[in-house]
Image (cartoon, coloured by chain):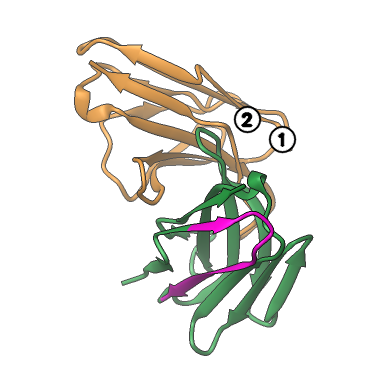
Amino acid sequence: EADIYQTPRYLVIGTGKKITLECSQTMGHDKMYWYQQDPGMELHLIHYSYGVNSTEKGDLSSESTVSRIRTEHFPLTLESARPSHTSQYLCASSGGYGPYEQYFGPGTRLTVT
Amino acid sequence: KNQVEQSPQSLIILEGKNCTLQCNYTVSPFSNLRWYKQDTGRGPVSLTIMTFSENTKSNGRYTATLDADTKQSSLHITASQLSDSASYICVVTDRGSTLGRLYFGRGTQLTVWP
């Protein structure tokens, strides 16, 4: 079992609210990722980080932002939630160089009403 | 365009039966192929990983095969159990980036009935 944690697991929130999804890993991995997954669909990369103070946007355009102030912590923030943001958000991390295995957290199921 | 296609989209089998899931990909240059199991409401968990030179890899009742020439992979599950009910996702990594870019299939939703 990978040591990567996400909170909250489930979140129902109203339109316009600011939310932060937390992701932490205790494996000392330098690379971390955020994916968005809708039911029955593939995972889409929305943000990634090579290390502290490094963040990049992924393939899927997202209105969310991320920060990487500490190696173990990679939070995702939505300044103003909308119903279109309803989805599952998965955090992952990997260590070493090149295409090493990514370990996934349990995910946050976000519903914006 | 780099893509990963999986079939069937969903599958129902009886407990104790075997099944095979398929994955076709166009990702290039190829680095490795992984099969993940994703339980409902959970993150994916890696089952097997195969590089270009490997054509089969087993993990308990799970056996994955890879044909890098035809860009096809399969995941065979033997003696299925109720706990095998999950989505099985084929993931291909390209070796053209230091990030280790992953390409995900949409998964095969497997349901095992008693």
Q: Relative to residue A49, is residue A23 depicted above or below?
A: above
Disc 1 residue type? Gly
Earlier-in-chain disc, 2 versus 1: 1
Q: Are marks 2 and 1 in contact (CB under 8 Å)?
A: yes
Range of the magenta residues?
B12-25
Quarter location, residue A112:
top left
Q: Residue at x 60, y 24 (%)?
A: A70
Q: Chain of mark 2?
A: A
Residue pushed farthest right? B60
Q: Colour of chain B?
A: green
- Residue beneath disc 1: A28
**Residue wearing tag 2:** A71
- Estimate how packed mark 2 is, as few (under 14), some (14 to 19) or many (20 or more) residues with alpha carbons within 10 Å: many
How far apart marks 2 and 1 lie (CA) works out to 7 Å
Instruction: Tell me the residue at 37%/23% (across/down).
Output: A110
Q: Main secondary structure of the magenta part?
A: strand
Host chain of mark 1: A
The reply, left or right, for residue B64 in relation to residue A84 is right
* Residue B45 in the image: above or below residue B96: above
Amino acid marked by disc 2: Thr
